[in-house]
Image (tube, helix red, strand yellow):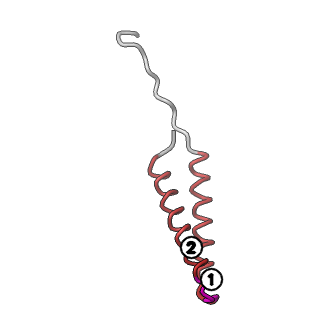
Amino acid sequence: MTDPRIEDHAVGVELQLTELVERRQRALVQGRTEFAESLQPEIEALQEELARTAELIANEHFERPEITEEGAG
């Protein structure tokens, strides 16, 4: 199991990244290459943040709770 807050953060970063990539694509189609290029550092920063968050999720493990029968022990 992982911390759901970290997973929520990853989803938020993915949404931001998707939006910026779409804005960059629209700018390229519209011939606004300078604006498209100006978005690249933000895109790269979000990609790095997403990679760091994915690493946290992959390395985070909580012990499963031990379930015992009622009255046992």
In the depicted structure, whether residue 73 falls above or below residue 12: above
Secondary structure type for disc 2:
helix
- Viewer-side residue, 28 vs 11: 28
Residue drawn at x 59%, y 71% as measured from the top left: 45
Residue 9: give its label. Answer: none
Disc tally is 2
Residue at point 46%, 28% (across, down): 65
Image-quadrant location for residue 52: bottom right
| Dot 2 crowding, Cα within 10 Å, few <14, some 14–19, many 20+ | few
Query: Which one is earlier in the sequence, the residue at label 2 or at label 1?
Result: 2
Range covered by the magenta-colored residues: 27-33
Q: Position of residue 49 (x, y in %)?
A: 58, 64
Q: Is residue 29 magenta?
A: yes
Q: Quadrant of residue 37?
A: bottom right
Q: Position of residue 58 (x, y in %)?
A: 61, 46
The residue most toward the left is 71
**Residue at screen point 64% across, 88% down:** 33
Task: Tell us which disc is closer to us: 2 or 1.
Answer: 1
Give the amino acid type for the residue marked by disc 1 in the picture. Val
Query: Which residue is the site of mark 2?
Result: 22
Report the amino acid beneath label 2. Glu
**Left or right: where 67 falls relative to 32:** left
Examine the rendered structure and indicate whether residue 14 appears above or below residue 40. above
Where residue 13 appears, x then y in whole percent? 52, 63
Q: Which residue is mark 1?
A: 29
